[in-house]
Image (tube, rainbow, N blue to C red):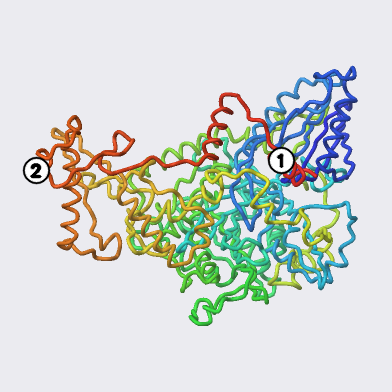
Amino acid sequence: RYFLVGSNPAETKYRVLKIDRTEPKDLVIIDDKHVYTQQEVRELLGRLDLGNRTKIGQKGSSGLSRAVSAFGVVGFVRFLEGYYIVLITKRRKMADIGGHAIYKIEDTNMIYIPNDSVRVTHPDEARYLRIFQNVDLSSNFYFSYSYDLSHSLQYNLTVLQMPLETLKTETTQSRQESFDIFEDEGLSTQGGSGVFGICSKPYEKYVWNGKLLEAVKNTVHRDWLLYIIHGFCGQSKLLIYGRPIYVTLIARRSSKFAGTRFLKRGANCEGDVANEVETEQILYDASVMSFSAGSYSSYVQVRGSVPLYWSQDISTMMPKPPITLDQADPFAHVAALHFDQMLQRFGSPIIILNLVKEREKRKHERILSEELVAAVTYLNQFLPPEHAIIYIPWDMAKYTKSKLCNVLDRLNVIAESVVKKTGFFVNRPDSYCSILRPDEKWNELGGCVVSTGRLQTGVLRTNCVDCLDRTNTAQFMVGKCALAYQLYSLGLIDKPNLQFDTDAVRLFEELYEDHGDTLSLQYGGSQLVHRVKTYRKIAPWTQHSKDIMQTLSRYYSNAFSDADRQDSINLFLGVFKPTEGKPHLWELPTDFYLHHKNTLTLSQTRRSYTYWWTTGVLKHLPLPFDEVTCAENRRKLTVKKFQKYEEEIDIHNEFFRPYELSSFDETFCLAMTNSTRDFMPKNVGIDPSPFTVRKPDETGKSVLGNKSNREEAVLQRKTAASAPPPPSEEAVSSSSEDDSGTDKEDEGAVSQRSTPVKVTDTGDNTKITENVVQSTKDVYGVNLSDVPSDDDLTIYTRFVQLGQSQHKQDKSSQQFSSKHHLDRVINLVPISSFSQDNIYEVQPPRADRKSIEIFHAHIQAGRGNMQPLGKDDFLMYREYIRNRYM
């Protein structure tokens, strides 16, 4: 048997799973649902170890041995032989939302469960295993123990605001059925000391290991189920005069109709589209951590292929294969299913931003535009006018080629109108400063205003043909516009407007570029070809060669490796299940039938052509149906009552980990990208604000500046000796605005004094340029007097004479002689015991007896001679053991 022992982070509570290894093809797992203490688990494992030895008292391989240590179970999978278990063996923290850590999977391990004695071998098993492992779990798969990544922040926090009476009726779980998602933010009962913990079912569309956990979902306790998402997660710290604001970007890739670029286009029969990704930007003030007391804001947008039946034939080996519409859909059946899903999850209005080409010599992309317009026009006939789908066509490629038009200015106008219609989520009422400094744009903002803050209603859905390059730039512009409103709502800027070339926008742009590159690699096989800088027309000339390389990489990937990747995804997601006597995965001519269920079985119920939405959705619009308090949604929640000070719901322990040894070098909040360290120019002077427009070549990362003036440039390289240490998080968050402002000026000054490395020109004569020293006014903001006073000069001259006379002193003639000393002003005798120190009088520091004894003991311990422990040592150790384990 295998025994799976799981613990909480503090290692005070344990659960045990028993996995039977005698079944060759079935999965037999026994969960006793009991919570063990550390002592009980040790005794249990000790008994198992003893009971499994061949002879009593014999130690060896016949007892219990540890096979692997892991951070979670991805799931169980079976091909043609027995089951495998997939375990996470390495993880890395990527983000932090309100004290809840989000981890990226770095490495996994697959273990075959059945014993060799009962194993029934199959010749094709190894090939299936290889295909399954083609899905690289160490690239962009994320999980969290205590935060639901499949839902948006708005959903997760709206669930917490549910009325108390509703929760009391739901508390039917037994005492043993404990769980640990969102308990730390429970709702206090009136007058009592208890809190309610709420857990919602994950949104299956964005869960990638749903099929792998299906075999055990109903047999094991829900603590064992760890849901993972695929996409992107990045977090950066925006320091506003020392106040830490965390900017987080989470992208969830849909697991329905998932696949690679040319092999997955359009939509399937259930309304799921290819390359569908939900991108959420979360902004919060990290100086206050909890969800109930902190300030949190989020904005969600979606990208996805055009929701029609269409495809591209790649057998022709053309860079742009012709687009073909596969099925006639006069009643927009697929589009109706797709927009129905969106109305349920996001509410109204749904805004479509279509970036495909409108004018072409040969009709190519325009086919999709014409069909999409027809579908949206048809569906809008039956919706109430106030909730109609808004369609915005904009030929981005045409505007990019035009020299007269600025693409990003036009996108900015679209972004403003979109954010005004949808609004955004913020979990606190409008701050008083927005009443003191009213803004016209703020008053026109849409969304839904509630007593606890604002809700985003509706969503922007952006698409081009691939939903990669053009889409990412458009999403960045909308995100930048939403970010300005989010900062304004938290009272951090005075107008909801952000300029390019500020530290804040540079930081946000870098996050979006990483996000775009990651999603492009997953779907298209290469990084982004056109970036924000390309559309701003400020990209360096070297970018063109990189673009060509990315285009070639994308073409190669599409032509040669996409089919294998598609097979792997189909196997991993359980779209294809290997069965004895049926064709193997590699024998199928196409996977069309796997993704379109209606080709195998006819649906018994036919949806209405006019009432194309789910019943109940329209009644609650513009609010999303998923977030409304109703009986159907309550069934998705699990509720349990906790004591107020229970360890399970203690967010302080969860975040600060007082039971672990912490190192500042490894602390996530200090290592993450930081606007002051990574984006603020080092010669910033008296303006450390991240909202000040800098020169295009002025940034913390590219300190060389303009490449053409290389002879005049002096590279300020931050060496280990000269670079100021990164400020600790506690110091940053607790300092006042004025203090931290001065700190930043000092930091700028320190790096100003860092080691100058002269940049030389490789010509006939090596020209070494001088370091251009800035005036004190530029660096400190204060003009220091140019000439010191006479008194200061006299003191300094005297100091120099002392030093010189000491250097001149002849140490060989130390005897007293009046003749020798009449010439000199003063006689100094070196009393320092440090031989090199011959200017200052220095005495070695005196150490007390106890310190000397400790030091001697330390030296002896290093040589292996341990000191006997005293009574105090025993008492201290006993106290530690009692607090830690008893």
Residue 214 on image: x %, y % = 81, 43
Quarter containing the C terminus = top right
How many residues crowd around disc 2 within 10 Å: few (fewer than 14), some, or many (20 or more)?
A: few
> Residue 462, located in which quarter of the rendered image?
bottom right
CA gap, disc 2 and disc 1: 68 Å
Q: Quadrant of residue 125?
A: top right
Residue 305 visible in the picture = no
**What residue sits 67% from the left and 38% below the top?**
569
Task: Report the front residue among 239 and 193.
Answer: 193
Disc on res. 877 = 1
Residue type, label 2: Asp
* Residue 546 coordinates in the image, percent (x, y): 40, 41
Position of 414 with respect to 833 (left or right) is right
Q: Which mark is residue 823?
A: 2
Looking at the figure, which quarter contains the N terminus?
top right
Horizontal side of 425 relative to 738 (left or right) equals right
**What secondary structure is marked by label 1?**
helix
Quadrant of the rendered image containing residue 164:
bottom right
In percent of the image, x 83 and y 61: which residue is there? Answer: 641
Mark 2 and 1 residues: CB-CB less than 8 Å, in contact?
Answer: no
